[in-house]
Image: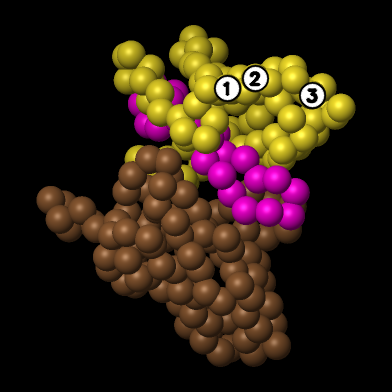
Amino acid sequence: QVQLHESGPGLVKSSETLSLTCTVSGGSISTYYWSWIRQPPGRGLEWIGYIYNSGRGSTNYNPSLTSRVAISVDTSKSQFSLKLSSVTAADTAVYYCVRGIVVGAFQYWGQGTLVIVSS
Amino acid sequence: DIVMTQSPDSLAVSLGERAAINCKSSQSVFYSSNNNNYVAWYQQKPGQPPKLLIYWASTRESGVPDRFSGSGSGTDFTLTISSLQAEDVAVYYCQQYYSSPWTFGQGTKVEIK
């Protein structure tokens, strides 16, 4: 069974960079689309972007965030990571790492990690 | 961006009765070359991540009870719970993965009447 686990600071200061890591177990990280999705408290879901680790590690980001976001993968550690720069209070959310069953349909989810941006 | 609009925002149904949630996309999410609608449905309970119920608009994920079904094509889709159980109380989201950015509906809260 594939399992995903998010880790990283739960508190980030405004204007700084949010950094999270997702550790994957129970399956190969070398294929599939690996995404980050966030959910502000009490609100809906927003797809942040994905990395497709088929050799080149191609990425695709939500245009609303593309100037601030980077997703990378470390195949040797079975991890992929999210960096979101210049954060504001609007970036406060539960962040999920996710794997798709098919491109864009999200089958496996981490439990999520709450990141609060403080001023 | 493709906007996904769900209706209603909330729904109260008696145990054992049918619940239906609608989702409308701002443009077609049907890809004729493979005859697929790029729509998924998720269930989210409090304090938990979303759970995939349906993909390709009507394909039930493994392990999902058969009282959950998805239908529709083009721009109009429906998630139906044929006989509501207490454990089905949750927020339900539709999502399109036809074009980037992949987008979700605003959610529909299902409660027991």
Q: Are marks 3 and 1 in contact (CB under 8 Å)?
A: no
Image side of residue A69 versus residue A9, left or right = left
Q: Which region is colored magenta?
A: A29-51
Q: Dot 1 falls on which chain?
A: A
- Disc 3: host chain: A
What x and y, as percent, mark residue B32? 15, 55
Residue A85, position in %: x, y? 65, 19
- Horizontally, residue B67 falls left or right of residue B109, namely left
Residue type for callout 1: Arg
Quadrant into which the C terminus of chain B falls: bottom right
According to the colouring, which chain is brown?
A: B
Q: Residues within 10 Å of mark 1 (few under 14, many from 20)?
A: some
Task: Please give the chain letter of the residue carrying mark 2.
Answer: A
Q: Is residue A42 magenta?
A: yes
Question: Looking at the image, do the residues carrying marks 2 and 3 touch, with CB atoms under 8 Å apart?
Answer: no
Q: Earlier in the sequence, mark 2 or mark 3?
A: 3
**Residue A65 visible (yes or no):** yes
Residue ID for mark 2:
A85
Observer able to see residue A28: no
Q: Which mark is residue A14?
A: 3
Which color has been applied to chain A in this rendered view?
A: yellow
Q: Nearer the viewer, residue B96 or A102?
A: B96
